[in-house]
Image (cartoon, coloured by chain):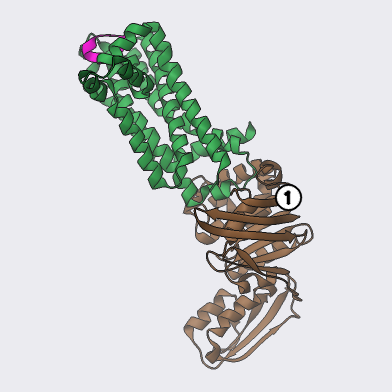
Chain colours: A green, B brown
């Protein structure tokens, strides 16, 4: 446990000094600041008003940015460290491979999750100060959704880092994974597939397997489940699961996917050459 | 202490290590030499449990891959290229000390002996230190604990003569209780530090020989050089070794050279042979 925490702390310190982290923090802090500055809390769209409107917009933007950011920065730094000889030196120290790998994940998870959560927390604190109603239930669920989203893509990123032997290959693979998930969003390829008479079961299964789609449906559908907003397969999914069932699924499935990916990454890392 | 039994390593189709059999006892100081691509770094990485390989590697009877924590707790490693770590120096020292179960002050002491002003660099990023400072710090981390095996890849390449002398002294303090493997491209860089030479080529051991060296690691040699004429470039090189002019015309020079560094020093002199009228190195000086 001591080795795990030492490694996590090391990764946190390394990340805090990295340029990607500064940009990452600036992006999410900037989004919240801009949403306030443009008076989003004053407008009503699709039934959302006040901080609910801001939170829905924030989570939509986060869903677009966080996955690719986490994937690329994780594979870049892990594969880059390996190429640059950081692994050769640090893994010559007496640290267990499990403590090293999971410590790295823990440290990076804290660094990835903290800025997106703190930006949202900042919005809630500001809303409380200027007397805007805070939708606490929504805030709580979105926090859980962001935590799960970070874990899911971090796990996938660590798996790619363990498999790829160079930074270029890792970056390319990460980008392809993100692109595939993006293409199979409800409103893009799945909509086209349904129009092209693909069995609805196939479309629904693909939508359920795609963590990006799961987050999108969960973030939006629970509060305004209209077909026009959700897309065809998401509407069917919500109809099948029910709101509460889907809420649980939207947290459990991506978290499991992230954990399974990370575990697979660890097994590959432990079995092969370390530097 | 260290055993390699039929160790082989293949990257894709390239066989980088080809059936290495080597046994290194306690107290042995081995120079691992060979040209680029000979397999030195791969062998070291197998020894540190970083590469999977065919055959068996053991340190103190244990597989370094299987018993990482226990085995690597007894190994000090200095890499050839310092890693580009962004963390502050203080954190690197604390991290290494915590993992190795040693007191960070011990590492600070050795770094100070090597000439590092440790207090002033504790908050500086490791990657922002000069090449020599990084090397000194990595040596201090490797020596600042109870390491029974020291694995060093070109450890003194970036050190100035003064720091090299202190480095030799530090190694001399560990002669009785540590096994050393010192990797280098050139034998003259490390010959004075070792009592055995293993040369590698194309992934095989092509030479394994003992070295009889009468000059101890802590010995100092009194040096005197008389030049035919003054040459500024040569004068600058001599001053880098703390050899100073002793006459008004700067033709006669004198100073002290660390015993293990004599081949390296003579290598420098050989480049200016035409200028040298007289040269003496005598062992009688102990400074």
Foreground pick, B218 / B82 = B82
Q: Is the residue A98 above or below the residue B278 in the image?
A: above
Is residue A122 among the parts visible in the rendering? no
- Can residue B65 be found in the magenta stretch? no
Foreground pick, B31 / B79 = B31
- Total labels: the figure holds 1
The quadrant holding residue A229 is top left
The residue that mark 1 highlights is B146
Give the secondary structure at mark 1. loop
Q: Is the residue A30 above or below the residue B265 in the image?
A: above
- Can residue A225 be found in the magenta stretch? yes
Image point 50% across, 56% down: which residue? B13
Apparent side of residue A145 relative to residue B205 in the rendered image (left or right): left
Chain bearing tag 1 is B
Foreground pick, A30 / A186 = A186
Foreground pick, B17 / B50 = B17
Q: Is the residue A104 above or below the residue B209 in the image?
A: above
Place of residue A105 in the rendered image (x, y in percent of width and height, measured from the top left) = 51, 33
Place of residue A182 in the rendered image (x, y in percent of width and height, measured from the top left) = 30, 28
Image: magenta residue range: A221-231
Place of residue B73 in the rendered image (x, y in percent of width and height, measured from the top left) = 69, 46
Place of residue A99 in the rendered image (x, y in percent of width and height, measured from the top left) = 60, 35
Q: Badge 1, how many Cα within 10 Å: few under 14, some, many 20+?
A: some
Is residue A142 among the parts visible in the rendering? yes
Quarter holding the N terminus of chain A is top right
Apparent side of residue B107 relative to residue B248 in the rendered image (left or right): right
Image point 42% across, 14% down: which residue? A249
């Amino acid at each position: 446990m001591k080795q795990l925490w030492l490694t996590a702390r090391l990764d946190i310190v390394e990340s805090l000094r990295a340029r990607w982290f500064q940009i990452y923090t600036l992006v999410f802090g900037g989004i919240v600041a801009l949403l306030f500055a443009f008076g989003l809390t004053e407008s009503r769209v699709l039934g959302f008003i006040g901080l609910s409107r801001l939170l829905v917009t924030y989570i939509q933007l986060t869903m677009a940015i966080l996955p690719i950011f986490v994937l690329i920065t994780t594979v870049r730094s892990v594969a880059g460290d390996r190429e640059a000889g950081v692994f050769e030196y640090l893994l010559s120290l007496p640290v267990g491979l499990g403590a090293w790998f999971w410590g790295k994940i823990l440290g990076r998870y804290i660094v990835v999750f903290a800025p997106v959560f703190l930006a949202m927390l900042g919005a809630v604190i500001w809303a409380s100060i200027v007397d805007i109603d805070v939708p606490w239930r929504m805030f709580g669920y979105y926090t859980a959704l962001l935590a799960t989203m970070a874990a899911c893509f971090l796990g996938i990123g660590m798996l790619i880092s363990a498999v790829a032997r160079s930074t270029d290959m890792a970056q390319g693979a990460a980008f392809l994974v993100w692109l595939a998930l993006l293409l199979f969003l409800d409103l893009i390829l799945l909509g086209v597939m349904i129009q092209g008479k693909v069995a609805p079961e196939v479309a629904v299964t693909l939508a359920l397997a795609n963590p990006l789609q799961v987050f999108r449906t969960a973030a939006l559908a629970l509060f305004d489940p209209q077909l026009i907003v959700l897309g065809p397969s998401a509407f069917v999914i919500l109809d099948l699961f029910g709101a509460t069932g889907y809420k649980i699924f939207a947290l459990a499935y991506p978290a499991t996917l992230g954990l399974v990916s990370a575990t697979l990454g660890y097994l590959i890392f432990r079995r092969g050459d370390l530097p | 202490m260290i055993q390699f039994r039929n160790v082989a390593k293949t990257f894709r189709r390239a066989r980088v290590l080809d059936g290495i059999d080597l046994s290194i006892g306690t107290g042995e100081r081995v120079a691992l030499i060979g040209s680029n691509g000979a397999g030195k770094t791969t062998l070291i990485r197998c020894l540190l449990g970083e590469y999977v390989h065919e055959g068996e590697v053991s340190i103190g009877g244990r597989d370094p891959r299987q018993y990482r924590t226990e085995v690597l707790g007894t190994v000090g490693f200095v890499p050839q290229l310092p890693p580009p770590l962004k963390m502050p120096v203080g954190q690197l020292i604390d991290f290494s000390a915590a993992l190795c179960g040693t007191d960070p002050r011990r590492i600070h002491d050795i770094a100070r002996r090597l000439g590092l002003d440790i207090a002033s660099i504790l908050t500086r990023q490791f990657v922002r230190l000069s090449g020599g400072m990084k090397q000194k710090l990595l040596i201090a981390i490797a020596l600042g604990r109870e390491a029974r095996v020291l694995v060093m890849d070109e450890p003194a390449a970036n050190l100035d003569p003064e720091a090299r002398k202190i480095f030799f002294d530090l190694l001399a303090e560990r002669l009785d209780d540590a096994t050393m493997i010192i990797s280098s491209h050139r034998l003259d860089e490390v010959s004075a530090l070792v009592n055995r030479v293993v040369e590698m080529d194309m992934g095989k051991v092509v030479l394994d020989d003992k070295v009889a060296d009468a000059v101890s690691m802590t010995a100092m040699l009194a040096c005197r050089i008389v030049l035919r004429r003054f040459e500024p470039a040569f004068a600058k090189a001599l001053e880098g070794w703390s050899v100073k002019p002793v006459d008004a015309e700067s033709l006669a020079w004198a100073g002290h050279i660390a015993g293990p560094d004599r081949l390296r020093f003579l290598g420098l002199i050989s480049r200016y042979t035409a200028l040298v009228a007289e040269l003496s190195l005598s062992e009688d000086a102990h400074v």
